[in-house]
Amino acid sequence: MALLTPDDLKNMTDDLVENDTLIHKLTGFSLDRLCSEIYKTEKKKEKIAIIPVTAGCGIIGRFSESLLFTVKHFGMDGFITKNTDVAGFYEAVMSDADIVLMADDLAFIAYNLKNKKIAHNQICTGRVYAEILCRSKTPDLVAEKKALVIGLGKVGTPALETLLKYGYDVSAFDADEKRVNDVISYYSKLNTGPHTDLAGRVKKYDKNAGEKFYKILEATPALDTVPENCLKNGSLLSTPGIPCGLSKKLQEKYNVMIVQEPLGIGTLSMLYAVFDEK
Ligand code: NAI
Ligand code: PYL
Ligand code: MG
């Protein structure tokens, strides 16, 4: 998995606040209300422990602090454990934490010690960024139940699934041709059985066909992955991808709205995934 750098996180607090405002404008929901709608859960007074983890490439500067900002910005009780790793987990339990947030290089999880719910960052990130696309209400965006998904990895795939569950026709692209073919054939086989709702509405995106989209989801670690000929004036790009896959020049030329933030949106999605049902 591509690891964040302290530099990726240096504007995280402003990014989260600005994206929360944009999400409210697009969907009618603030980010926390949107997450509550998505998971049908609600925060109570959970105490959230953030445990720094030294495994692998080690602690990432600003990572724990960014999680703490997210928790506190949305009115929750959180703290960063003084100890790291197992000692930090022990400290969290002894401090009567309800939920722990911790990440090594392979997984970032939220675990609710009380109701035993667990959430994975890549799944919850893909879902929330796709939900933002589906729930965007501006006139043009509502009319179009189709989307372009660029990047079919651990974040892009849950995003694709979310779009299909909303009845979207999805054009899918990935630099890995085999990955695209595997995704297309998987969903075309779903014509029978319990998943017919997901069947057949995924097609391979053809860069040369020039099809245009109001709704685009990008989940890759690369630059310039969003081609100019897929853009409409006023397109909405919902992208967890770091760095942003659309150049500033094209963003301005086509007045593209961009929902993009390095960590907090996905983290809030994880927390609502492990809160108790409403
Ligand atoms: P992944 O490695 O599982 O998937 C990335 C996919 O992008 C792969 O299938 C790869 O073939 C494809 N790809 C790479 N370069 C491409 C290009 N130039 N054009 C088209 N496709 C290309 O990675 P994962 O975990 O899905 O993460 C995707 C991105 O999202 C990464 O940049 C990661 O750092 C970021 N991320 C951001 C989060 C947030 O909260 N903003 C949370 C989690 C991940
Ligand atoms: C969750 C992020 C989003 C994109 N890439 C993922 C990443 O960077 N994962 C690694 C997180 C490691 C955190 C480190 C610490 O500071 O506790 N172990
Ligand atoms: Mg995010």
Image (cartoon, rainbow, N blue to C red):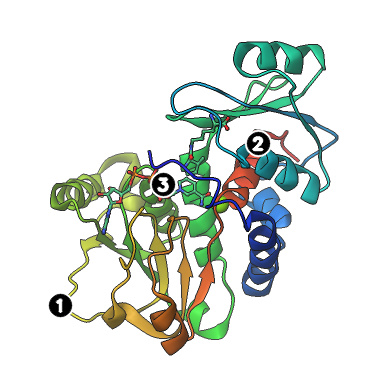
Which quadrant of the structure image shows residue 99? top right
* Amino acid tagged 1: Asn
CB under 8 Å between discs 3 and 2: no
In this rendering, does residue 74 appear at all?
no
Q: What is the C-alpha distance between the residues marked 2 and 1?
A: 43 Å
Q: Residues within 10 Å of mark 2 (few under 14, many from 20)?
A: many
Q: Classify mark 1: helix, strand or loop.
A: loop
Q: What is the C-alpha distance between the residues marked 3 and 2?
A: 21 Å
Residue topped by disc 1:
208
Spot occupied by residue 75 in the image (x, y as percentages of width and height): 83, 47
Q: Classify mark 3: helix, strand or loop.
A: loop
* Amino acid tagged 3: Val
Residue behind label 3 places its C-beta within 8 angstroms of ligand 1:
yes
In this rendering, does residue 233 appear at all?
yes
Q: What is the C-alpha distance between the residues marked 3 and 1?
A: 25 Å
> In the figure, 74 relative to 235: above or below?
above
253 lies left or right of 72: left
Towards the viewer: 135 or 101: 101
Residue topped by disc 2:
64
Residue behind label 2 places its C-beta within 8 angstroms of ligand 2:
yes
Q: Quadrant of the C terminus?
A: top right
Q: Classify mark 2: helix, strand or loop.
A: helix
* Residue at screen point 27% across, 82% down: 229
* Residue at screen point 63% across, 49% down: 264
Spot occupied by residue 20 in the image (x, y as percentages of width and height): 68, 63
Q: Residues within 10 Å of mark 3 (few under 14, many from 20)?
A: many
**Marks 3, 2: nearer the viewer:** 2
**Marks 2, 1: nearer the viewer:** 2
Towards the viewer: 9 or 94: 9
* Residue at screen point 54% across, 52% down: 262
Q: Which mark is residue 155?
A: 3
